[in-house]
Image (cartoon, helix red, strand yellow):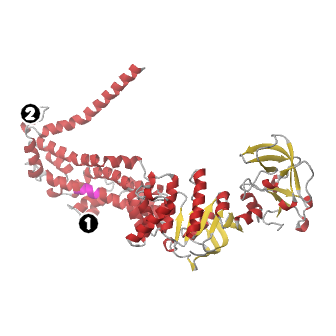
């Protein structure tokens, strides 16, 4: 049980590549913190720095009131679950879990009691004598969790632990990880590139991009009020529609009279025949593609008329090609491909960003 | 079509049998000769069926020695060869495991230089460096000793390379998990890397044991005392080229005895050997 605090943490590789460009982060005792971002954003590096597997170029990492910059991974009182589980292939499940305890010189009965308790919690009691090779992906995942639990560490670190599982199992394990963490009350840091995983697991969500933190907060707050266009496009599936607007367009006042970027979530758009709502936005679209997923239907439309210049909206991960708008319709009824439709959203559903996408202009 | 295939299969089998016969017949002949009377062999009247001197000849070979030039019984030579081959095989494995571990898992200055220096020694087998190696062995008083027989042949680029390749396929996460589990470099080596390398070590042991067993040039140079000679040297010395009569049954019995240990090693290690070459357990 511990707070984890990062103070202006930086990582520069020997080649001069700056992987982490100054991260400040405070994770409270027992909180579940999720680091999310596209690949190469530095989230795994940051986690490995907390684990002690990467050196810290500058700044401080504090676990439970102790600065651990110079402390060996084994002495940081952390446990880590790896993406490929990293189980010892030649050891039985029991020994995989017991190994770390034995290395610490714990008494045999104590080890046995802890391993059996962890096995009971994770329902792998029947597999203690098997080798990792003889287990399914989900079972290996449980053993990897078990190896972390038996240590009773101050902090759990998860490095994309579910990405090797199939979709169904991933959802089941996600729920289990969350339940387990609540039950044990252990502070956790979890790295993922899956925004759905991030949204559902996190107490504190940290959206990272290019080695910097884009936004920290409660997942729903981030969803409702993304601080940058990157966050807006990354959190939420399908992503937020982002369109540039000229000064004065839609009656939006931007300081300095410049233009900006307007964001609307696909679920906030409704099909209409009338004019734009007061202060709202209205898109004239030609339907290009339809995706029916059962409970909802996604309509991909191209904006009728002049497409905005491509440079105005950068091709960041998860963003739509310029001029394309997604509308989420409940149910299965949808227009036909090629049909002209009008989608509109009221003023209070709009997100307004500065032209560079780095800041949010409405509160 | 079916008939054709049948013929082809018979043909393939016939060729294989001929191959086996070509390889096996000399071995059979050696065994037969070792059980015959020397006079029968000398006058070319050797039968192709086992003779009645099996126990007598093998007892003489193993424990008494031939009356001719070797003066030592083959039992001593077998022991010498065994000690040499085992020291070479085990020594090579131990040293290459450690050097490969250092090269793959540790970051130290001139790591790649060290690796390339080891690599380059591949081009310098004993035959090429025979004079300096002999000089060093002589200066270190290693002549006519087991260490002299084995030490100069122990450093091995091949085995180091093999272990390096294997270690590089071990996922980094395994080492990181060990570090988090509180295992230092030595524990990681002992608890994780060694058990994982088991099959590789077995395969390598078979190859290196036979390599050591078959050494000829080096033992010939380094040993002068009769009680230090290896079986390969012994066989050569038994064959008399001057006017004395070679004791062919003893020579053949020695050859058969020289063949047995490598065969035994291959048979015992076969399963591990094949697994070591084809499968990686991770």
Residue B224, x across and y down, in percent: 18, 57
* Horizontal side of residue B12 vs B102, given as left or right: left
Q: In this view, does B15 lie above or below A1?
A: above
Chain-order first, disc 2 or disc 1? 2
The residue that appears at 81% across and 52% down in the rendered structure is A310
Say yes or no: labels 2 and 1 on the same chain.
yes
Residue A359, x across and y down, in percent: 79, 66
What is the span of residues highlighted in magenta in the rendered image? Answer: B83-88
User: Which of the 4 image quarters holds residue B201?
Assistant: bottom left
Residue A114, x across and y down, in percent: 45, 68
The residue that appears at 82% across and 50% down in the rendered structure is A323
- The subunit carrying tag 2 is B
Query: Badge 2: few (under 14), some or many (20 or more) residues near its Cα, within 10 Å?
Result: few
Secondary structure type for disc 2? loop
The residue carrying mark 2 is B43
Nearest the camera: A216 or B73?
A216
* Horizontal side of residue B112 vs B5, given as left or right: right
Q: Residue B48 carries which label?
A: none
Q: Is residue A54 above or below residue A317?
A: below
User: Which of the 4 image quarters holds residue A349?
Assistant: bottom right
* Horizontal side of residue B68 vs A278, given as left or right: left
Q: Which mark is residue B139?
A: 1
Farthest residue to the bottom: give it.
A65
Query: Badge 1: few (under 14), some or many (20 or more) residues near its Cα, within 10 Å?
Result: few
Q: From this viewpoint, is residue B274 visible?
A: yes
- The residues tagged by marks 2 and 1 sit, at their Cα atoms, a distance apart of 49 Å
């Amino acid at each position: 049980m511990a707070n984890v605090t990062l103070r202006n943490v930086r990582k520069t590789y020997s080649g001069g590549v700056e992987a982490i460009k100054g991260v400040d982060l405070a994770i409270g005792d027992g909180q579940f913190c999720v680091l999310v971002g596209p690949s190469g954003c530095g989230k795994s590096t940051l986690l490995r720095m907390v684990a002690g597997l990467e050196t810290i170029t500058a700044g401080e990492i504090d676990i439970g009131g102790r600065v651990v910059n110079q402390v060996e991974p084994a002495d940081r009182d952390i446990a880590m679950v790896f993406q490929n589980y990293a189980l010892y292939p030649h050891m039985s499940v029991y020994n995989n879990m017991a190994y770390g305890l034995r290395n610490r010189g714990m008494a045999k009965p104590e080890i046995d009691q802890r391993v059996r308790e962890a096995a009971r919690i994770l329902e792998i009691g029947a597999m203690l004598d098997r080798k990792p090779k003889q287990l399914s992906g989900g079972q290996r995942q449980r053993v990897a969790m078990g190896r972390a639990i038996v240590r009773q560490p101050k902090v759990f670190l998860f490095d994309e632990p579910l990405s090797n599982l199939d979709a169904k199992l991933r959802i089941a394990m996600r729920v289990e990880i969350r339940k387990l963490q609540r039950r044990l009350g252990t502070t956790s840091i979890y790295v993922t590139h899956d925004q759905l995983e991030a949204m559902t697991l996190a107490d504190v969500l940290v959206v990272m991009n290019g080695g910097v933190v884009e936004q920290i907060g409660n997942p729903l707050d981030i969803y409702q009020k993304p601080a940058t266009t990157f966050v807006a496009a990354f959190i939420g599936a399908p992503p937020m529609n982002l369109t540039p607007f000229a000064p004065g367009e839609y009656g939006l006042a931007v300081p300095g009279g410049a233009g900006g970027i307007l964001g609307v979530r696909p679920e906030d758009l409704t099909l209409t025949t009338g004019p734009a709502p007061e202060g709202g936005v209205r898109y004239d679209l030609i339907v290009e593609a339809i995706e029916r997923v059962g409970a909802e239907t996604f309509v991909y439309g191209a904006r009728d008329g002049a497409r905005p210049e491509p440079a105005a909206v950068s091709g960041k991960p998860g963003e739509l090609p310029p001029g394309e708008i997604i509308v989420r319709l409940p149910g299965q009824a949808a227009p036909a491909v090629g049909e002209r439709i009008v989608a509109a959203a009221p003023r209070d559903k709009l997100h307004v960003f500065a032209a560079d996408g780095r800041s949010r202009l409405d509160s | 079509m079916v008939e054709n295939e049948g013929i082809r299969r018979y043909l393939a089998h016939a060729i294989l049998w001929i191959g086996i016969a070509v390889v096996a017949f000399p071995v059979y002949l050696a065994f037969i000769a070792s059980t015959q009377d020397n006079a029968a062999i000398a006058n070319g009247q050797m039968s192709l069926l086992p003779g009645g001197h099996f126990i007598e000849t093998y007892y003489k070979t193993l424990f008494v020695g031939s009356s001719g030039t070797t003066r030592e019984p083959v039992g001593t030579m077998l022991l010498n060869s065994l000690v040499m081959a085992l020291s070479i095989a085990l020594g090579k494995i131990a040293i290459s495991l450690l050097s490969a571990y250092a090269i793959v898992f540790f970051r130290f200055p001139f790591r790649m230089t060290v690796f390339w220096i080891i690599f380059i020694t591949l081009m310098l087998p004993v035959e090429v460096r025979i004079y300096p190696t002999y000089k060093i062995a002589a200066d270190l008083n290693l002549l006519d000793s087991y260490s002299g027989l084995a030490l100069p042949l122990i450093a091995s680029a091949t085995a180091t390379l093999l272990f390096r390749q294997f270690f590089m396929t071990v996922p980094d996460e395994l080492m990181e998990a060990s570090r988090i589990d509180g295992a230092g470099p030595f524990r990681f080596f002992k608890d994780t890397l060694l058990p994982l390398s088991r099959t590789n070590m077995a395969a390598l042991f078979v190859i290196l044991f036979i390599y050591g067993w078959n050494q000829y040039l080096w033992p010939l140079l380094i040993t002068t005392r009769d009680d230090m000679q290896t079986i390969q040297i012994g066989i050569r010395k038994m064959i008399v080229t001057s006017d004395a009569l070679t004791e062919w049954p003893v020579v053949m019995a020695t050859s058969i005895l020289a063949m047995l240990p490598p065969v035994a090693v291959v048979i015992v290690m076969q399963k591990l050997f094949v697994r070591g070459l084809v499968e990686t357990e991770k």
